[in-house]
């Protein structure tokens, strides 16, 4: 399942030193919000983890698969909004021939929604 350009639209990617920031826009009409939760939608944490992988894969231009969630903290509910902008901030990226890891913070201008430390296996395309 790809969430990029379905649940969220890619609005741009910015470099910040050794880190990079991906700017996304909510798509509140996405079907998942009808069931999670009807009348009071929030973005599922599993979707944030999946989207982090999709964004890192796109940035690295390598096929990756989640191996380990070293740490994840959901700090605030991410409620979908029309024209809502959210940023995925990637830092501490380490990569070798078979693995890569990254720290990811999901935020907007006012709130931090999640902090994650993720490890991925790298496979050939």
Image (cartoon, grey):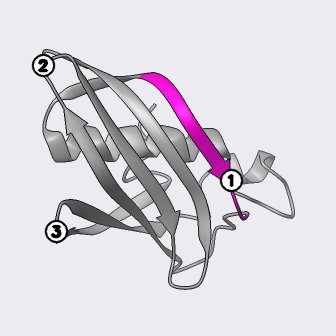
Label 2, label 3: how many angstroms apart (C-alpha)?
A: 23 Å
Q: Position of residue 124 (x, y in %)?
A: 13, 15
Frontmost residue, 73 versus 87: 73
Label 3: how many Cα within 10 Å (few below 14, some 14–19, many 20+): few
Q: Dot 3 lies on which element?
A: loop
The boundaries of the magenta stretch are 67-76
Q: Which residue is mark 2?
A: 97
- For image coordinates 38% across by 38% down, the residue present is 53
Label 2: how many Cα within 10 Å (few below 14, some 14–19, many 20+): few
Q: Which residue is mark 3?
A: 17
Chief secondary structure of the magenta portion? strand
**Sequence-first disc among 2 and 3:** 3
- Image quadrant where residue 17 sits: bottom left
Q: Position of residue 87 (x, y in %)?
A: 42, 68
Relative horizontal placement of residue 13, taking residue 81 as reference (left or right): left
Which numbered disc covers residue 28?
Answer: none
Q: Dot 1 lies on which element?
A: strand
Quadrant containing the C terminus is top left
Whether label 1 touches label 2, CB < 8 Å: no
Q: Which residue is mark 1?
A: 74
- Residue 32 in the image: above or below residue 12: above
- Residue 49 in the image: above or below residue 66: below
Q: How many marks overall?
A: 3
Q: Dot 2 lies on which element?
A: loop
């Amino acid at each position: 399942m790809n969430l990029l350009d379905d649940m969220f639209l890619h609005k741009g990617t910015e470099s910040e030193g050794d880190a990079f920031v991906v700017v996304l826009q909510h798509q509140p009409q996405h079907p998942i919000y009808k069931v999670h939760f009807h009348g009071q939608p929030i973005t599922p944490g599993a979707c944030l983890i999946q989207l982090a992988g999709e964004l890192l894969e796109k940035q690295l231009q390598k096929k990756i698969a989640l191996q380990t969630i070293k740490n994840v903290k959901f700090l605030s509910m991410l409620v979908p909004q029309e024209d809502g902008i959210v940023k995925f901030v990637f830092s501490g990226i380490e990569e070798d021939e078979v693995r890569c890891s990254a720290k990811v913070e999901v935020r907007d201008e006012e709130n931090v929604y999640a902090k994650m430390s993720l490890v991925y296996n790298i496979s050939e395309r």
